[in-house]
Image (cartoon, helix red, strand yellow):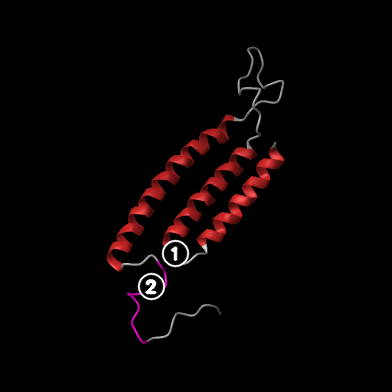
């Protein structure tokens, strides 16, 4: 099961990076969301995927005697989901306002802050 999830996480990372390299704002936002989900799944896999055994220590023991699920990554993921959703909502409103003001979602068309007639900034060094 963990090998399948690792492959899914790799595909999520690849798709997220591919979309973030796009010229259109909506694709960039979707790439950020998919990339965030890949990070959440990575944290979840690091906490061991155990479905049958709850993270409860029996009475009389200081440590669990069998393999148990780790509740800390699950709590971290719940917090990360809330934060990533609020970030996505903010970026979506920001992109919508930029589209309303500029009339385009193409990042090359959003260069109105740069003076016309000048060369583009250096693309590499």
Earlier residue among tags 2 and 1: 1
The residue positioned farthest toward the front in the image shown:
103
The quadrant where residue 104 appears: bottom left
**Residue 103 placed where, x, y %?**
31, 67
Rounded to the nearest angstrom, the CA distance separating label 2 from label 1 is: 10 Å
Task: Report helix, strand or loop for mark 1.
Answer: loop
Asked whether the beta carbons under mark 2 and mark 1 sit within 8 Å of each other, the answer is no
Q: Position of residue 111 (x, y in %)?
A: 37, 74
Camera-side residue of 23 and 73: 23
What secondary structure is the stretch in magenta mostly built from?
loop
Where is residue 35 shown, x and y percent of the image?
Answer: 54, 51
Residue 86 in the figure: left or right of residue 42: left
Give the residue number, with chain letter if any, for mark 2: 109
- Give me the residue at 52% from left, 59% from top: 19
Side of 78 relative to 116 (left or right): right
Assess disc 1: are there few (<14), some (14-19) or many (≥20) residues with their C-alpha within 10 Å of its C-alpha: some
Looking at the image, is 17 positioned above or below residue 52? below
**Does residue 6 lie above or below 15 as drawn?**
above
Residue 113: quarter of image: bottom left
Q: Which residue: 66% across, 41% down?
A: 5
Q: Which residue is mark 1?
A: 24
Q: Which residues are magenta?
A: 106-117
- Neighbours of disc 2 within 10 Å: few (<14), some (14-19), many (20+): few
Q: Quadrant of the N terminus?
A: top right
Question: Which quarter of the picture shows residue 3?
Answer: top right
Residue pushed farthest top?
60
Residue visible at 49% across and 36% down? 78
């Amino acid at each position: 099961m963990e090998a399948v999830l690792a492959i899914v996480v790799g595909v999520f990372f690849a798709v997220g990076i591919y979309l973030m390299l796009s010229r259109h704002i909506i694709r960039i936002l979707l790439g950020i969301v998919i990339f965030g989900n890949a990070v959440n799944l990575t944290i979840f896999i690091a906490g061991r995927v155990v479905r049958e055994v709850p993270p409860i220590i029996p009475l009389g023991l200081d440590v669990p005697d069998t393999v148990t699920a780790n509740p800390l990554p699950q709590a971290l993921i719940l917090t990360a989901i809330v934060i990533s959703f609020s970030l996505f909502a903010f970026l979506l409103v920001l992109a919508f306002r930029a589209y309303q003001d500029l009339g385009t979602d193409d990042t090359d068309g959003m260069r109105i802050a740069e003076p016309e007639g000048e060369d583009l900034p250096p693309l590499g060094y």
